[in-house]
Image (cartoon, helix red, strand yellow):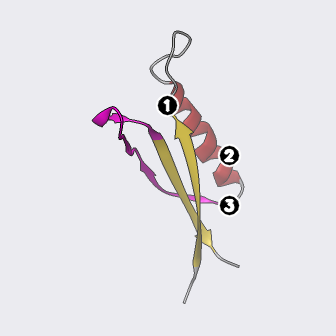
Amino acid sequence: MKKYEYKFVEVTVKSGLKTTGGDAFDECKKIILQEAENGWRLNQVVAPFNEKMGMYAAAGYQIIFERVAE
């Protein structure tokens, strides 16, 4: 039976005058491609809500990777 290991990477959504709408998405793409080169497979991307702002405001993204444990 195969065993898996998991890696969790958090990408925070930044706000301010110098940010644009796709900054967080571009950061997620960069991380996914970088981790794929290191043998990690994308499992899931989760956008947990910001508890202070309400359930429709994302605090950031949690990117979950997996690979077969050695």
The image position of residue 37, as x and y in percent, is: 70, 52
Mark 2 secondary-structure assignment: helix
Residue 14 in the magenta stretch? The answer is no
Residue that badge 2 annotates: 34
Q: Pinpoint residue 14: horizontal percent, then vertical percent.
A: 52, 26
* Disc 1 residue crowd, few under 14, some 14–19, many 20+, Cα 10 Å: some
Instruction: Determine the main secondary structure of the stretch shown in magenta.
Output: strand
Residue 41 within the magenta-colored segment of the rendering: yes
Q: Amino acid at mark 2?
A: Gln
Q: Foreground: 20 or 2?
A: 20
Q: Which residue is mark 3?
A: 39
Q: Amino acid at mark 3?
A: Gly
Residue 12: image location, x then y, percent: 53, 35
* SS for dot 1: loop
**Amino acid type indicated by mark 1:** Val
Residue for badge 1: 13
**Residue 23 in picture, x, y percent from top left:** 53, 25
Q: Residue furthest left?
A: 55
Q: Which residue is painted at 49% across and 31% down in the image?
A: 13
The residue range painted magenta reads 40-60
Q: Earlier in the sequence, mark 2 or mark 1?
A: 1
